[in-house]
Amino acid sequence: MISNFGNLLLFISIVLSLSIIYLSNKNIKLNGNQITKNIFQLSLIQSTIVIICFFTLIAAFIVSDFSLITVYQNSHSMKPIFYKITGTWGNHEGSLMLWVIILTIFSFLFLIYNKNHPKKFRLLTLIIQNILIIGFLFFIILNSNPFSPLSPIPKEGLGLNPILQDPALAIHPPLLYIGFVGSSIYFSAAIASLISNYSEKNFASSIKNWILISWSFQTLGILVGSIWAYYELGWGGFWFWDPVENASLLPWFAMTALFHSIIVFEKRNLFYFWVIILCLMTFILSVTGTFLVRSGILNSVHTFASDPTRGVYILSFLSLMIFGSIFLLFKKYKTENYNLNQNSKETFILVNNWFMMFYLVTVLLGTIYPIFYRRSLSK
């Protein structure tokens, strides 16, 4: 029953996303700067449906419904309700539902709270965001469905991974996901800005608060994760170069550089294309980290999944994002002449950005190096 209901909600979400894309594209062609009311309604319904879907999964964990494979593999009837709930996102399938919730909620909130910006820019952002939502919904349905049924139904579950049974885990993944999945909204806004040629200072104001929100949650999530790691293994170095930890650190470097740059862009109308690059880079790095830790290509002490077929889907999705973004960026790119004073605040912020990029590249290369190292050993 829960399996059928959950899958129905997932399919409805896809239909709603397609409807939003169609109506938004149609509304762009209409005269005026007003977005039709049905787009707001559909976006609200979409967010509501996805939230209901996630709470349906939480309910399945609470009542120990072992007819779902995900519940069977990550819960136990004797576990405290606290760990039953956290078991919802303490696995690959459930964590992807968190992805979709954040994507849809940020999509709706961006539409609501950016009413003073051009219609075309807002609707293009909504379209790009819903393309991302559809991509992850298909990933869930085809490859990582938390509502996959299990037959015959076992009497007891396998229980939650012991290292995940810590109070810090209850808030660690949601905080991180709000951080790096939240970066999707300014990824979408950056593409919409390029397409609509909306490169004024007002563009900076449209995304500045979203950058601050995602950076704050990402920072807090990394801090809580560090506390959790200390409880589990101490400071023995086990977690300090782990792919899962680095997956959250990589977009944090880009976010930090972006937050400094967006302030300069808003005040002095400088660094527009650099801001766009950082917007695109932040979410691409988030998906890259997801690919590294869920594809089995790298080993981790607390990875969610190691399924190569899942890795192929994420890699394909990631490749489309990267090549599409690069193509659009090169098509729209124009040389900017900054003429900065070497002692100005803007110069020091730019230098700060370079340091962040250096740290980012160092961590990225250090994280993926074992892939090539193992291959050289196997030859």
Image (cartoon, rainbow, N blue to C red):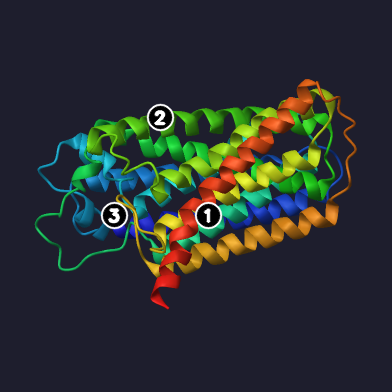
Mark closest to the chain's N terminus, 1 or 2: 2
Residue under pointer 2: 223
Name which residue type carries label 2. Leu
Mark closest to the chain's N terminus, 2 or 3: 3
Q: Quadrant of the C terminus?
A: bottom left
* Residue 49 in sight from this viewpoint: no
Q: Residue lying furthest bottom in this view?
A: 379
Apparent side of residue 154 relative to residue 288 in the rendered image (left or right): left
Q: Nearer the viewer, residue 110 or 248?
A: 248
> SS at mark 2?
helix
* Residue 146 in sight from this viewpoint: yes
Q: Quadrant of the N terminus?
A: bottom left
Apparent side of residue 197 relative to residue 54 in the rendered image (left or right): right
Q: Residue at x 55, y 42 (%)?
A: 251
Name which residue type carries label 3. Ile
Name which residue type carries label 1. Thr
Q: Residues within 10 Å of mark 1 (few under 14, many from 20)?
A: some
Residue under pointer 3: 2
> Does residue 138 lie above or below 332 as drawn?
below
Q: Nearer the viewer, residue 246 or 146?
A: 246
> SS at mark 1?
helix
Q: Nearer the viewer, residue 211 or 360?
A: 360
In the rendered image, residue 162, in percent from the top left (x then y), is placed at 18, 45
